[in-house]
Amino acid sequence: MNAFHDRRIVLGISGGIAAYKAVEVCRRLVDAGAYVSPILTEDAHRFIGPVTFSALASEPVHTSLWDDASPIPHTRLGQNADVIVVAPATARIISAYATGSSYDLLTATLIATRAPVVICPAMHTEMWEHPAVQHNIEVLRSRGVIIVDPQEGRLAGGDIGAGRLADPDTIVGAVESVLSGRGHDLAGLSVVVTAGGTREPIDAVRVIANRSSGKQGYAIAEEAHKRGASVTLISTVDRPTLSGISVIEVETAAQMLHAVEQHAPQSDVVVMTAAVADFRPVHVADGKIKKHNGIPEIRLEPTPDILAALGASKSTGQVLVGFAAETDDVVDNARGKLKKKNLDLIVANDVSAPGVGFGHSTNAVTIISVDGSETFVPLADKHTIATAVLDSVLAVRTALRPQ
Ligand code: C5P
């Protein structure tokens, strides 16, 4: 079931230049099936016309405490909302919300609601980094408000720095994870995910490859990003993904090992979804091997076992997840690997079953934890599998935490 279907979202737009980007956020929320009520602050009107939002949203724009048919619009909007998202949120709105000050419809609605609130700040770098703004952000965070951090990038006036409104994908993703009940439960975590099959060169044009599409790894990276993690995706495939995810392109097992070695030590969670080749040619021919020279003999050697290396150097508290694509004795084989490679979780799938594993958009897995527990996730799309894997990661982290 789509998390947005028939859900009520109040979209607050405050007066920053990024207000125009809220049009795209509004459109996506409506397209996803949500009922969207926009509230524009008085200053937001200076940047964007209310008619634009009224045309796209599910009901006309609200702007004032006084000109609505209802005498108490803020209580109605606040009580009926499943989630309130403010994008962009100016320093002023953030300050008012943190101190409980109510001076217009948006601030009154924020204070009148019990619904979860997602705040997407956007402002100049100097303002964003000001201790008062950072303090207010921490106050809100400590109250459970979800903060979708601004990105680094070009700001109004041509400066470059932190403070640019998060992109619509990220904002909509954060709202989706709130509506699905998980919220930003991975906020503050740094997650490395590998995806796709490695390609090991034979000569200048040929490679040894495998059937991995990268879909499962991308789904894990995207779900982790929506749940607030900072995600690095080390990938062999060129697939579109959410723009807040940092993608590192690699091709071979050796390149993947190098990228993982650079990023894994600082990360809280590493998910090795990639199908890494087990063997590679000992010698790579410089040019193209010519047909008229006869059938070549290609000698193979083992590739580095990236996961085993990660297991051997795992830092305290880090959660390491492996995948095991098997065709028989699936769970037993996976349990053996979990132990041998010093993993916290292993996700086993029977790739001989219909609709499961390589290339499909669906998967069916058994998630085996180091504590011995097993979670079977029946055939489902790869995003649902990703959600279950990340739920297990959180369970392991909770168990690892010192009492
Ligand atoms: O032992 P096996 O290759 O089946 O283990 C599968 C897991 O190990 C997957 O998570 C895969 O990404 C990882 N792997 C690896 N390096 C290799 C081979 C597999 O990290 N050379």
Image: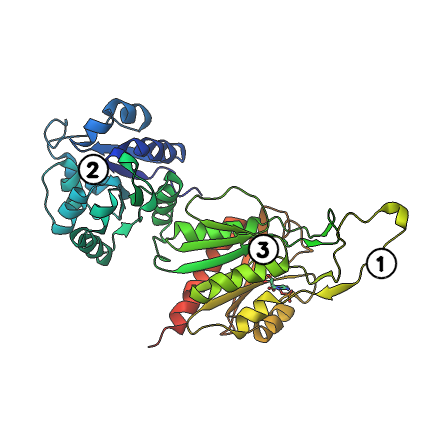
| In the displayed structure image, the side of residue 206 where residue 341 appears, left or right | left
Reading the chain from its start, which is encountered first: label 1 or label 3? 1
Reading the chain from its start, which is encountered first: label 3 or label 2? 2
* As drawn, 328 above or below 1: below
Which of 20 and 112 lies nearest the eye of the viewer?
A: 20
Q: Which residue is mark 1?
A: 297
> Residue at left 64%, top 66%?
304
| The label number, if any, that marks residue 332 in the structure image | none
Which of 353 and 56 lies nearest the eye of the viewer?
A: 56
Q: Quadrant of ligand 1?
A: bottom right
Answer yes or no: do the residues labelled 2 and 1 have beta carbons within 8 Å?
no
Query: How far apart in space, not on screen, are marks 1 and 3 (Cα)?
Result: 38 Å
Which of 240 and 72 lies nearest the eye of the viewer?
A: 240
Residue type beneath disc 2: Leu
Residue type beneath disc 1: Glu
Q: Which residue is mark 2?
A: 77
**Callout 3 crowding tier (Cα within 10 Å): few <14, some 14–19, many ≥20:** many
